Amino acid sequence: MADSSGRARLFVVSGPSGAGKGTVVAGLLQHRPDVFLSVSSTTRPARRGEVDGVNYHFVSERDFIAGRDRGDFLETAEVYGNYYGTPRALVEAALREGRDVILELDIQGALAVKRALPESVLIFIEPPSLEELFSRLRGRRTEDPDALRRRVQAAYDEVKEKGAYDHIVVNDRIEDAIAQVIRIMDAPQERTPHPGS
């Protein structure tokens, strides 16, 4: 929902792997189909079943670097030798049309967007406890023990950064977390207090 001035707003959702941020965003979009979900660009090859323009905008490394150098991205990152970025033009066009925009980014990307667009609203999705997060990650059974340990350490490091966010949503029950994000989007912009702030 546009703020009190009638302007659409940009929301960035982050959280550690296993916190359920993707599920929260998917649930939000079912309730709020008017919200524009920005699709990132990447230089990595498409995986089986992925669709260009839906999962990612798949581009060559040459085109990505040229776009980055022109300032075409709100934020970029290099992950395992592949580049990822949020196309600035798509986000700005949706905002001009009066549509709220949501991005699902890691912490570094979220903070980069906040620097580029200080009025953006950062929402951190966290599990009810680190023990629950680790249980969720183990339950996926998709990684070997070393990869799982790295993901757990990364999740621990990410949770320590939540104080940089405007709002923190604890994903204990997915329906409650979705409802809380919708309330944040519909409310006047303000930070929600959280322990340790």
Image (spheres, rainbow, N blue to C red):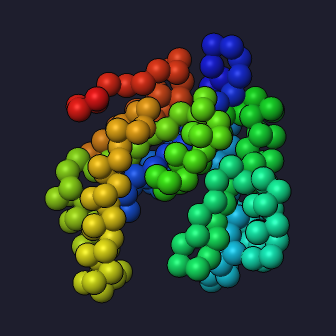
Q: How many marks on residues?
A: 0
Furthest residue toward front = 69
Q: Which residue is drawn at 60% across and 32% down?
A: 118
Residue 26 visible here: no
Residue closest to the eye, 99 or 120: 120
Q: Where is residue 157 in the image (x, y as percent from the top left)?
A: 31, 58
Furthest residue toward left = 131
Q: Residue at x 58, y 48 (%)?
A: 112
Q: Would residue 179 be found to the left or right of residue 189 on screen?
A: left
Eyeballing the image, is 74 above or below 33? below
Q: Residue at x 22, y 65 (%)?
A: 134
- Quarter holding the N terminus is top right
Q: Would residue 147 be found to the left or right of residue 134 on screen?
A: right
Dividing the picture into quadrants, the one containing residue 124 is top left
Furthest residue toward bottom = 144
Q: Where is residue 109 in the image (x, y as percent from the top left)?
A: 55, 53
Residue 112 visible here: yes
